[in-house]
């Protein structure tokens, strides 16, 4: 078990090991839902919530069900099932309390289920041998890091409505390029705090 | 000058509608307008980019870097002139290609980027890397977004960031000791090919526990990026920029303020320790060391990539100042101004959005 404190893992997951800008996980909804700051903020919050809850649940499921029953080979299916069930809950919640956001996110809300960042966080937690507290720090940090990245991209894309992007680069292409520059700028934090 | 006018008039038909070299018209016009004012006046705004007078802004920015350019020439010699030429040539090529495709004129904005870029590079950087960096910066950082006034990142910084991530070893090897003769290096060619003494920058030395005198940093006789070494000349240009209101004093004050406060807090709190005694000493040393001042005055104040609202500028400055401190003290990099300002550019639209949102809410509640 690694001995890094949960606090360090939390900071690292936001800045130095941002799950989106260094591992490039969860790109599909990142590109698709970053047209507007409000929408991206909504999706970002949903991802933070789902990520921290599923890492916690998956930690418990993995260490108290899968390991004792030696069913580790089922971890992918079980993790995805947990995530899917949880996202269903969130979806019902959002539909009930913020119909506007529900329609703005559209298909991308249920698609959080297959957001690779969420599954990625659970798998990293297993690979890196985090303890429960560390997992909480990592889940929260990874979620916040993802949300920060999508909100930043949304801000830039909103500003870019005044830009004059050449035809072949419009839409997804320029968003990918901007993401690249974002990742370049985040490289500046490299070495500040380190997790594997 | 009459002969030149004759030459230009003679080749003009080639570039006009129906001429053989019609496609190169933007290049021809740009060259012509260096020497002569156009004979025609514009009837309507052909490609207005911004309500501010772009040309005036750009010429002020160029005037303000003149002292720094001369200092770079004095300290690092003829090689620096070659870097400027390469930077202009490579950048203008990209710019001209886009102008030709878009059928617009070449914009003055590049003249600022083209001079700023060599100033933030190590003085013995291989020339092909200078060309690659500026081409990358202009292409990715500016032209893809529609050219001057429409970019979201500072093109020179995108180019430098790219070089420092792609060729970290070459960057680290390219620092040279500035000339210590009275006549400077005006006639010398310092470069990796000749016997240049590669010098570690003051910030790199500080990481090893060695801090030079502040006076050296102030005058500029230390290794560093070509234009960043002489604090006094940067201040001279910077004050001029503030005076002409091209640079926003809010940005400058908030970056330097947050930088000083955070560094002071770290030193006083014992989170970082320097061989220099006291709190004030190390803080002042850090302000004058490295690219902070250059970045503050010439990079961060770029009106296009910084927030437009005043409150946004304060927040933007705080982000840049504190990120610089964090990167300098806690990461593997010795200098963080490039990354910090790029991050500032990235968060700038969010700050504008927040400030404008609050303002709208306040107006609504007032009815």
Image (spheres, grey):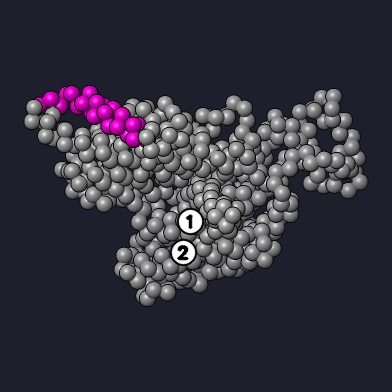
Q: Which residues are magenta?
A: A70-94
Residue B74's spot in the image, x, y percent?
A: 61, 61
Numbered disc 1: secondary structure: helix
- Residue at image location 42% in from the left, 74% down from the top: B280
Toward which corner of the image does residue A196 lie, by quadrant?
top left
Q: Residue at x 27, y 51 (%)?
A: A8
Sequence-wise, the earlier of marks 1 and 2 is: 2
Residue A110 appears at what percent x and percent y?
Answer: 36, 27
The reply to whether discs 1 and 2 touch (Cβ–Cβ < 8 Å) is: yes
Check disc 1: other Cα within 10 Å, few if <14, some if 14-19, many if 20+: many
Query: Foreground: B241 or B93?
Result: B241
Image mark for residue B320:
1
Q: Is residue A146 above or below residue B190?
A: above
Residue A71 in view in this figure = yes
The residue that disc 2 covers is B258
In the image: residue B278, left or right of residue B254: left
């Amino acid at each position: 078990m690694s001995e890094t404190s949960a606090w360090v893992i939390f900071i690292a997951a936001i800045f130095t090991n941002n799950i989106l800008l260094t591992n490039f996980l969860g790109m599909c909804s990142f590109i698709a839902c970053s047209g507007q700051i409000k929408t991206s903020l909504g999706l970002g919050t949903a991802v933070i919530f789902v990520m921290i809850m599923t890492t916690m649940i998956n930690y418990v499921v993995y260490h108290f069900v899968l390991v004792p029953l030696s069913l580790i080979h089922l971890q992918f299916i079980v993790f995805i099932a947990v995530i899917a069930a949880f996202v269903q809950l969130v979806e019902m919640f959002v539909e009930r309390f913020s119909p506007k956001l529900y329609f703005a996110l559209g298909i991308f809300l249920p698609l959080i289920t297959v957001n690779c960042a969420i599954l990625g966080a659970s798998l990293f937690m297993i690979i890196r041998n985090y303890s429960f507290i560390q997992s909480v720090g990592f889940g929260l940090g990874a979620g916040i890091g993802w949300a920060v990245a999508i909100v930043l991209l949304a801000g830039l894309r909103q500003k870019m409505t005044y830009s004059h992007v050449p035809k072949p680069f419009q839409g997804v292409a320029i968003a990918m390029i901007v993401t690249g520059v974002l990742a370049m700028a985040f490289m500046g934090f490299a070495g500040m705090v380190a997790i594997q | 000058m009459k002969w030149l006018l004759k030459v230009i008039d003679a080749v003009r038909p080639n570039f006009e509608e129906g001429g053989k070299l019609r496609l190169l018209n933007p290049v021809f016009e740009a060259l012509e307008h260096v020497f002569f004012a156009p004979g025609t006046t514009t009837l309507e705004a052909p490609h207005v980019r911004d309500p501010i007078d772009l040309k005036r802004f750009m010429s002020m920015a160029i005037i303000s870097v003149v002292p720094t350019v001369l200092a770079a020439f004095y300290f690092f010699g003829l090689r620096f002139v070659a870097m400027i030429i390469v930077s202009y040539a490579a950048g203008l090529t990209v710019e001209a290609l886009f102008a030709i495709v878009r059928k617009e004129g070449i914009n003055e904005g590049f003249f600022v980027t083209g001079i700023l870029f060599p100033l933030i590079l190590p003085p013995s950087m291989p020339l092909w890397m200078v060309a690659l960096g500026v081409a990358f910066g202009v292409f990715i950082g500016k032209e893809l977004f529609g050219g001057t006034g429409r970019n979201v990142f500072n093109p020179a910084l995108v180019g430098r960031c790219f070089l420092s991530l792609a060729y970290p070893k070459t960057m680290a090897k390219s620092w040279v000791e500035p000339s210590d003769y009275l006549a400077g290096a005006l006639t010398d060619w310092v470069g990796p090919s000749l016997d240049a003494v590669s010098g570690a920058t003051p910030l790199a030395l500080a990481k090893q526990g060695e801090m030079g005198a502040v006076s050296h940093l102030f005058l500029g006789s230390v290794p560093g990026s070509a234009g960043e070494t002489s604090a006094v000349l940067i201040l001279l240009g910077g004050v001029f920029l503030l005076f002409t209101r091209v640079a926003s004093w809010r940005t400058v004050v908030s970056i330097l303020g947050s930088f000083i406060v955070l560094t002071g807090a770290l030193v006083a709190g014992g989170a970082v320790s320097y061989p220099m005694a006291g709190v004030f000493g190390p803080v002042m040393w850090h302000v004058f060391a490295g690219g902070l001042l250059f970045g503050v005055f010439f990079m961060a104040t770029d009106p296009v990539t910084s927030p437009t609202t005043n409150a946004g500028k304060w927040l933007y400055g705080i982000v840049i100042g504190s990120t610089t401190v964090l990167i300098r003290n806690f990461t593997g990099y010795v200098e963080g101004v490039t990354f910090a300002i790029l991050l500032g550019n990235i968060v700038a639209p969010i700050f504008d959005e927040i400030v404008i949102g609050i303002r709208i809410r306040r107006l609504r509640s007032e009815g």
